Amino acid sequence: MRALRWHGRRDIRLDEVPVPPALAAGDVLLRVRAAGICGTDVGEWLDGPVSVRVPEGAEAVTLGHEILAEVVDTGAHVSTLAPGDRVVVEVNLTCGVCTACLRGRTNICPHTVALGLQADGGFAEFVVAPASACIAVSGSAGDRDAVLAEPLAVAVHAVDLVDVPDDARALVVGGGTIGQLLLRALAARRVPAALLEPDPFRRAIAEDAGFTAFASVADLSASTDDGFDVVFEAAGRADAVGAAVAATARGGMVVVLGVSAAPISIDTWRLVGRELGIRSSLSHTVDDVRTAVAMIESGTVVVSDLLTHTVPLSEAPRAFRLLASRTEQVLKCVIVPDPQATEQPTPEGA
């Protein structure tokens, strides 16, 4: 089968690799139907390794941690899934026994192995995952929507971290996929939210969905005197955290999701003088993924307008270049099987 693998910085290749080996008792073999390209994937290609790690003894690792797939085969102990079921994969495989896991904070388990970063992921024709990490998707959600469940779970987790007052106003800094999903997750919680984003194309996506969008901090300042009660930073730039702090009202909260390689500068007088809170949000738990799937299935959160590009696996490297350069109006790009792909899995040992 073909797989898009990370060999090193600026080195991703479409390789011919074996179909994953014979299944362990609790695993399922999945045929990938769609896999979203995350900003993390592009960052690992351009500047990694940051989170990506090639498994010991391997030459490379298959990227892709936003996975919508179909069950092809099940291990001997799997009774919850059957061939033909569509699933979203919770790609963060945790130890289950550390303090964080026992407290339900599996997203910060220090022993996490993430499919698509530290183990082979979804930019391939087939992938293996534990059945316990697969959330079934009903027929009410199409593939183009369901594939966005994993990034929506990131937004759900961040919103649920904060005890948002009923009369709160929220701001999202950064209009990428996570920023757009934060707006919608907040709306699902009945929290009015606006966007700060310099790119007109990304602002237009938010505005078309019914949200107010600002192009600059100056525009933002002209619209409000006292700031926003909760500000989510989802831009991943060093200056974005400072902008988030500047936009937060007295006694408010800043939630940082983005990761910047550059040092961050914050006006500490504004931070302390207004008694602001800062906390961070990392990824999601399996419960967040379940919540995201349910939101998409029910139509509580609409995501179809966020998917701007669909690219067959054979053209996946081009999609990475497109996202990095933004030579086209692109927000979310999803990799799908090639139309002519008909290979049947023949696991090693079969």
Image (spheres, grey):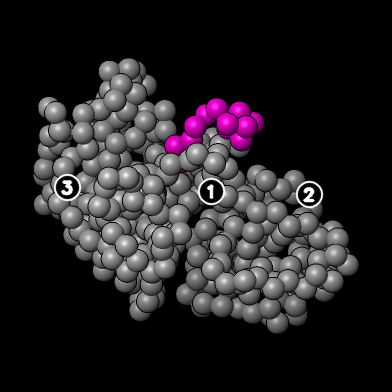
Q: Which residues are magenta?
A: 92-103
Question: Which sits earlier in the primary sequence, circle 2 or circle 1?
Answer: 2
Relative height, residue 299 to residue 199 (above, below):
above
Q: Is residue 206 left or right of residue 311?
A: right
Q: Secondary structure at mark 2?
A: loop
Q: 327 or 116: nearer the eye?
A: 116
Residue drawn at x 37%, y 76% as measured from the top left: 325
Alpha-carbon neighbours of circle 1 within 10 Å: few (<14), some, or many (≥20)? Answer: some
Relative height, residue 81 to residue 60 (above, below):
above
**Can you give x and y, in whole percent of width and height, for residue 68 in the image?**
34, 43
Q: Is residue 129 magenta?
A: no
Q: Is residue 296 left or right of residue 1?
A: right
Q: Given the image, on which type of amino acid does mark 1 rest?
A: Ser
Residues tagged 1 and 3 counted as in contact (Cβ below 8 A): no
| Residue identifier under label 3 | 17
Q: Given the image, on which type of amino acid does mark 3 rest?
A: Val
**Can you give x and y, in whole percent of width and height, for residue 193 in the image?**
66, 60
Q: Is residue 23 left or right of residue 50?
A: left
| Residue identifier under label 1 | 283
Question: Residue 102, located in which quarter of the rendered image?
Answer: top right
Q: Is residue 222 left or right of residue 189?
A: right
Residue drawn at x 42%, y 28% as measured from the top left: 132
**Can you give x and y, in whole percent of width and height, for residue 105 in the image?**
61, 37
Residue drawn at x 49%, y 32% as measured from the top left: 95
Question: Which sits earlier in the primary sequence, circle 1 or circle 3?
Answer: 3
Q: 232 or 105: nearer the eye?
A: 105
Alpha-carbon neighbours of circle 3 within 10 Å: few (<14), some, or many (≥20)? Answer: few
Say which mark, if any, is on residue 165.
Answer: 2
